[in-house]
Structure formats: structure tokens, C-alpha cells
């Protein structure tokens, strides 16, 4: 029996009609301040979910916990039906050490508000880094893949520019390419356009809309209400560390069920 | 007795001085490498979450910043072989002892330089690297260190220049570096001015070369794809234009 056929049942354990990524009763407290007070949230393959809410409502924290960048204080995170971020020891779950978390993070891509491109690397090298150091792809192949992905975000002509030489919109597109090239199961966006000049927001949203059309699974924390309405399959409102409302865009914007949602929409419209 | 240019020039091109300068440079460079390696570990200790690591790192910095380098040099050369028989053999030379003593003492200062450089790297950098799936060591190696080096370069150049001069302390353990060479010559000929002048020239040249190398290395860390701006009065303008285009 080959190694592949032994491994195969494990791989297909997950029923693709179940959520791809799911959190249950997620909790997080910073210095006695409750940021997440028990959040249930999931996303299916190919879905795009927009997450709205005032700052400090916990929406960005949820992304960071999902991306395993910070440990949760309670609750569980599952990817393709398997718990991540923790491992079983006896009858209880303990947090995985950073080295093991690093491996689990490969499946989850993250795009940050402030881009966080590596300033000492060119756009192309930024995109290549994950391939060469994590996926152990040969440098030449990595360069080809990086250039192809940069082309997809419309930046192949700037491949050899350093981040300091790129506009904010271009930097964020490189950051998207950097996450995308790792072929993640899901892409998390943490307010990807909030740090951009207004005239540069469009080019980033266009790229994201293209990804959504191509079937990418995406969770987008954003203040861009119009983007949420046009692109998302579902819109979620966070407030005070809990989910207030979750609905399709039409229902969310035209017929919100909660007073808190109506109040929020009055402020952003 | 007046200044005799011939003695001065003779010494300037003498093998003794060249060898003394060579020893000063080599001891300083090796000490800096030792100090950087130890200093990096100490710097990680000071920023660690572990109380034991933090305490040990602080103790190291406190101890070696407190005692004079000269005292430590004497301890390493005179006291250590009394305590450790393995050091009483021929391989334990003044050269090795000087590199070890200066490196270990200097590490306390390099630790602070490196700590400041590591802390200056934006937190988002490690976050982005971790999100990509890089292991802790790769985050450090591929993302944090390259950026920290740029910050650490100017103060490290300072430390190297300091070390060049610290090597003169090694005269007490009979290492014939640059200043000892001058002193020995003086004690035989009593031509103070000429011998000291030759030493001055050597120090000036050494430090000038270090400064030139430092600025050349710093240029490598500009992180722009632009061709170097022309050396004109408005050179800084063309650089700025390049960055915003």
C-alpha cells in the first residue's frame, strides 16, 4: 500500500459541505478587557463573508485568533473539521508550541491593515519568501510563481521595486499576492483598505472582488459598506465582542433585524 | 632634540608597526565577532519572556559594564590559568586571551546595540512572517535580522572603532599591538615624538578605512531599486523623486 493511499482517507475526512473554517464560543480578554465574549462564526468553501462593526468590537481579534497569531482564551477553532491551534494531551487540549502553529498557519492566509510588507525585499521577493522558506520551493520555480501571482494583481511591472517605492495600494496588492501564492484554504483580510488614501482603495477592492469571483474563500473585516454589499455572500455585525447580526447583504442592509444594526448603518451610510 | 622626519618615516614603514597595526585590527575584528554572537544571545535573553533568561542577561550586562576591560583582561590572562590547568599550555597565547577578554566584555555593549535594533523592527513584520507560516527561527533569520542589521550598523561601527583602541590595553598581557609597538620603540630610542606620531598615523588610517567601509555597507541597506543618485547638489531631490514615483 502506498503512502498516498494511507494518507488519503485522512485528507478526505472532511465533508466539504461542512464549514471550511469554524470558531465556536471564541473568547479573548486583554488585561481584564473582554474583547471576544463567545463568538460562533463559520465560513464554507468559496464563500465571502464581510465583517462590520465599530473599532474595538472584536472583529480584528477574531481574525488574529483564526490565523493562530494569538492564543484564544476559550473556545475552539476548526479547519476542515480538525481542531487547530491546540493538541490533545490526555483528555484535554493544550496550545501548540509556536513551531507547530507555524505549520498550521500555512493553510490560512492573512492580509493586514498596514500591509506589513518586508521592506528589505522587492515585491517579487516578498511573494517568494513563503514559497522558498516554508514550502521549500526551488528559487527559480518560486520566482515564476511569484511573477504569475503579481501579474494577477496587476503588478508584474513593479516586481523588482522595493515596498518603499510602491504606493499604498500597490503595497497592499503585493501583500495579497504574498498571501495568495501560498495557496491558502481561506484568506483573511483585516481592514485591508483602512490605511489607504481614498483614491487607492478602489484598486485593492477590485483585486479582492476578482478573487471572490474566482471562488476564493474570504473573510473580510472592513468598513467598506458598498464592497460588503456587492461582493459578500453574508454580512456580519460585531459589537462589544459578540455577533449582533448575520444575514445576506440584502437583508442586512435593507431589512436589519436589530436596532444596533440600524444604528450602525445610520452612521456609516 | 627636535622632530626627525627620517626616524618617523622609517618607523611608519617598519615591519614592527605594520605587524602591530595588523594585530590591533585582527584582535578588534575577532572581538567584535565574538561580542556580536554573545551579544545576540544576551539581547534575546533581555527580550525573552522567561524570567531566568532575562535575569541572566541583565546580570551579564551589569557585570561586564561595571568592571574595567583592563581588569578583565588581567583576570583572563593571569588568574584563569591558575584556576584552569588546561589554560597553562602553549596554545593559550596573549592573542587568544585578548580576543576572548575583549569579546566577552564588549558583548555587554553589543547586547544593548542589538536589543535596540531588534526592538526597532516594526511588530507587524514578525506578525506577517508568522502568518505566512515561517518558523520562529526563520522569522528571525529572514525578516527581523536583515532589518535590525541596518539599525545596528552605525553603532556597531562605533564599537569597532572603540575596540581598535581597546586593543592597546592588551599591552599589559604582552601582546605587541600597535601602541605597544610604539612604546617598546620609545623605551629603546627615547624618540617619543617620532614613534608616537607614527602610531597616530596608523590609528587615523585604520579608523578612516573603517568609516569608509561602514558607509559603503550602509549603502547596501538602502532597499531601493533606483540607480544611485548623481552626486550633485540636488542629489537628495532625485532620491526623493525616486521613492515617491
Image: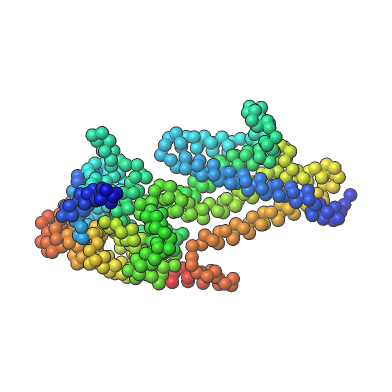
Residue, far right: B1
**Does residue A96 appear anywhere in the picture?**
yes
Describe residue B7's horizontal placement relative to residue B29 as left or right: right
Residue drawn where x is 17% and y is 61% of the image:
A233
Give residue B120's position: percent from left, percent from top.
Answer: 46, 51
Q: Quadrant of the C terminus of chain A?
A: bottom left
Q: Is residue B162 visible?
A: no
Q: State left or right for residue A82 relative to residue A151.
A: left
Q: How is the image coloured?
A: rainbow
Q: Left or right of A132: which side holds B10?
A: right
For the residue pair A83 and A4, the one nearer the viewer reads as: A4
Q: Position of residue A84 (x, y in %)?
A: 27, 46
* Numbered-mark total: 0
The residue under the point 59% across, 71% down is B231
Where in the figure is residue B197, as x and y percent of width and height? Answer: 78, 52
Q: Quadrant of residue A50?
A: bottom left
Q: Identify the residue at horizontal 60%, vertical 52% (top origin).
A: B157
The residue at 68%/44% (across/down) is: B167
Q: Quadrant of residue A156?
A: bottom left
Of residue B92 and residue B189, the one placed in the foreground of this image is: B92
Residue B123, x across and y down, in percent:
40, 51
Amino acid at each position: 500500500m502506498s503512502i498516498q493511499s494511507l494518507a488519503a482517507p485522512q485528507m478526505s475526512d472532511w465533508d466539504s459541505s461542512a464549514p471550511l473554517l469554524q470558531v465556536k464560543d471564541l473568547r479573548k480578554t486583554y488585561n481584564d478587557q473582554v474583547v471576544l465574549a463567545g463568538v460562533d462564526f463559520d465560513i464554507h468553501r468559496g464563500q465571502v463573508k464581510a465583517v462590520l462593526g465599530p473599532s474595538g468590537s472584536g472583529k480584528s481579534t477574531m481574525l488574529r485568533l483564526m490565523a493562530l497569531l494569538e492564543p484564544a482564551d476559550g473556545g475552539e477553532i476548526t479547519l476542515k473539521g480538525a481542531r487547530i491551534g491546540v493538541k490533545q494531551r490526555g483528555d484535554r487540549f493544550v496550545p501548540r508550541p509556536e513551531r507547530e502553529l507555524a505549520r498550521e498557519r500555512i493553510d490560512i492566509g492573512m492580509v493586514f491593515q498596514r500591509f506589513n510588507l518586508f521592506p528589505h525585499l522587492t515585491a517579487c521577493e516578498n511573494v517568494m519568501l513563503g514559497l522558498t522558506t516554508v514550502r521549500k520551493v526551488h528559487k527559480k520555480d518560486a520566482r515564476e510563481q511569484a511573477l504569475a501571482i503579481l501579474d494577477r494583481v496587476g503588478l508584474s511591472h513593479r516586481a523588482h521595486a522595493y515596498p518603499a517605492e510602491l504606493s499604498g495600494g500597490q503595497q497592499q496588492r503585493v501583500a495579497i499576492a504574498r498571501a495568495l501564492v501560498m495557496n491558502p484554504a481561506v484568506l483573511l483580510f483585516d481592514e485591508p483598505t483602512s490605511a489607504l488614501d481614498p483614491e487607492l482603495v478602489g484598486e485593492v477592492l477590485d483585486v479582492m472582488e476578482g478573487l471572490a469571483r474566482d471562488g476564493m474563500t474570504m473573510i473580510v473585516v472592513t468598513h467598506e459598506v458598498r464592497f460588503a454589499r456587492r461582493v459578500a455572500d453574508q454580512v456580519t455585525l460585531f459589537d462589544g465582542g459578540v455577533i449582533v447580526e448575520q444575514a445576506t447583504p440584502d437583508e442586512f442592509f435593507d431589512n436589519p433585524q436589530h436596532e444596533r444594526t440600524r444604528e450602525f448603518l445610520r452612521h456609516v451610510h | 632634540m627636535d622632530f626627525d622626519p627620517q626616524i618617523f618615516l622609517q618607523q611608519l614603514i617598519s615591519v614592527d608597526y605594520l605587524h602591530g597595526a595588523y594585530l590591533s585590527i585582527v584582535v578588534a575584528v575577532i572581538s567584535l565577532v565574538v561580542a556580536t554572537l554573545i551579544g545576540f544571545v544576551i539581547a534575546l535573553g533581555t527580550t525573552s519572556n522567561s524570567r531566568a533568561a532575562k535575569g541572566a542577561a541583565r546580570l551579564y550586562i551589569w557585570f561586564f559594564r561595571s568592571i574595567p576591560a583592563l581588569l578583565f583582561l588581567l583576570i583572563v590572562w593571569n588568574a584563569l590559568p591558575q584556576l584552569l590547568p588546561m589554560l597553562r599550555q602553549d596554545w593559550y597565547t596573549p592573542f587568544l586571551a585578548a580576543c576572548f577578554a575583549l569579546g566577552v566584555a564588549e558583548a555587554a555593549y553589543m547586547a544593548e546595540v542589538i536589543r535596540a535594533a531588534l526592538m526597532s523592527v516594526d511588530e507587524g513584520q514578525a506578525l506577517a512572517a508568522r502568518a505566512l507560516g515561517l518558523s520562529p527561527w526563520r522569522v528571525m533569520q529572514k525578516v527581523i535580522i536583515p532589518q535590525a542589521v541596518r539599525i545596528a550598523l552605525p553603532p556597531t561601527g562605533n564599537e569597532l572603532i572603540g575596540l581598535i583602541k581597546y586593543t592597546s590595553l592588551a599591552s599589559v598581557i604582552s601582546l605587541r599591538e600597535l601602541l605597544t609597538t610604539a612604546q617598546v620603540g620609545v623605551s629603546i630610542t627615547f624618540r617619543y615624538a617620532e614613534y608616537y606620531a607614527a602610531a597616530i598615523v596608523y590609528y587615523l588610517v585604520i579608523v578612516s578605512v573603517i568609516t569608509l567601509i561602514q558607509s559603503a555597507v550602509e549603502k547596501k541597506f538602502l532597499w531601493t531599486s533606483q540607480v544611485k543618485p548623481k552626486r550633485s547638489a540636488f542629489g537628495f531631490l532625485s532620491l526623493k523623486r525616486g521613492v515617491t514615483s
